[in-house]
Amino acid sequence: MQINKYIYSINYDNNERELSKLESRYLFNAEEKNKLLFSDIKVAPSCSAFLKNRLDILAASNNYETLITDIKNKKIQIEGFKVEYLVFKGDTIGYTDRLEKLREIGYSIEGIHDYYQPKTTFALSYYEDVWYFGVLIKNNLDWHKHKQKPYSFSNSISVNIAKSLINIATKGSKEIKLLDACCGVGTILLEACFAGNTIEGCEINRKICKSAQANISHFNYTAKIYHSDIKDICKRYEAAIIDLPYNLFTSATDSDIVHIIQSTAKITDRLVIVSTTDITNLINNIGFRILDTCSVSKKGKGNFARKIWVCEKN
Ligand SMILES: C[S@@+](CC[C@H](N)C(=O)[O-])C[C@H]1O[C@@H](n2cnc3c(N)ncnc32)[C@H](O)[C@@H]1O
C-alpha cells in the first residue's frame, strides 16, 4: 500500500473552484479529488484560503484493528491532546461507531485529554478502504484579521485571491523574491508577509502608496513599497504579480496596461497577472508564454470575472 505523508482537506465556493485547482497545481503538482489531496509536499494550511487542514499521517491500514495495534505500538505520550474524526467522501461509518473508535484511540495514547484547548489534535479518518490516523494541523484563519485593515479599496481583489496569487507565483517556495507591481493598498503584500514570503510593492499613486504602507505597519509586517511608476523599477525579481488597474478609481487605458505589463516583464521571468480582459496577445508580444489560466468570479456576481494568467519568459 503506497501511503503519502499528508492528506489535505480542501474547501472552496463554486466561484473559486478553478482558482483553488490552479493553486493546487502550483503548490502540489496535483489537483484534489473529492476535496482531498494526498501529497508528500508539506504546506502550512494557513498559507491558503482553500486548505482547511492537513493530516500528518502517523499510521494507515486497510484493517481498523491493525491500525489500533500500530497506534499502541507507537507508545505516544502527550499532554493536552484531543482526537477528532474527519469524515471524508464515501465514509458511511455511523456516528456512534465513530465516537466508539475515537474513544478507543484516546485510550491508546498516554496523557491527559484537553477537549477545549488541545496542544495537539489527532484525527482518524476512513477513505477508499483505508483507515488513517495522524496529527491534524488546521488552517488557523489568523489571516482573516487582514479583512479589517485600516485602508481598503472598494474593488480590491479578495484575500482568497491574494493568497492564491502568492502560492501560484512562488510555487510554495519561501525563498523566491516577489514583486507586487501595482500594489494598491497592499492586499497581496499583507498575505505574502503573513505567509513568510519576501515581497516588495510598487504603486504610482502617492495616497494609495501611503495607505499600503500604513496597512503593512498596522500588522507589524515589513515590506518595502516604492512610490513609483513600475517603469522606473530596475531591480530584478524571481516572480512578479500584477493586479491590473480596472475599476473607476484606477481606470487605465489600453496603453497603460501595455506599459505596466512590458515594464514588469523587463524585471522578471515569471509573471502572474490578474485582468478583466483578454490579454493573450499582449503576453505573446512581450516574449512570454502562458502556462496556465483560470477565471474567478465574485460571489453572487457571476457576470464580473477576473482572469488569472500564469506566464514565463520564452
Ligand atoms: C487594481 S489596483 C491594485 C489593487 C491591489 N491589488 C489592492 O488589493 O489594493 C491597480 C493599482 O495599480 C496602480 N498603478 C497604475 N499604473 C501604475 C504604474 N504604471 N506603476 C505602478 N502602479 C500603477 C494604480 O494606482 C492602482 O492602485
Image: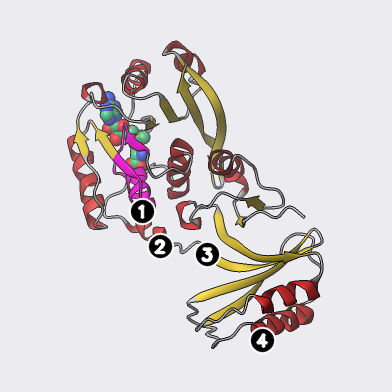
Farthest top residue in view: 285
- Badge 2 is on which residue? 142
Q: Amino acid at mark 4?
A: Tyr
- Badge 3 is on which residue? 138
Side of 288 relative to 115 (left or right): left
Q: Amino acid at mark 2?
A: Asp
Q: 43 or 226, which is in the foreground? A: 43
Magenta region: which residues? 176-199
Indicate which quadrant contains ligand 1. top left
The answer for how far apart the CA atoms under marks 1 and 2 are is 9 Å
Side of 230 relative to 137 (left or right): left
The answer for how far apart the CA atoms under marks 4 and 3 are is 23 Å
Q: Are the residues at dot 1 and dot 2 in contact (C-beta closer than 8 Å)?
A: yes
Q: Earlier in the sequence, mark 1 or mark 2?
A: 2
Identify the element where label 4 is drawn. Answer: helix
The answer for how far apart the CA atoms under marks 1 and 3 are is 16 Å
Residue sitting at x 44%, y 38%: 170
Side of 206 relative to 52 (left or right): left
Image quarter in which the N terminus is found: bottom right
Give the image location of residue 22, x and y in percent: 57, 38
Residue sitting at x 67%, y 77%: 73
Verify whether residue 129 appears in magenta: no
Q: Are the residues at dot 2 and dot 4 in contact (C-beta closer than 8 Å)?
A: no
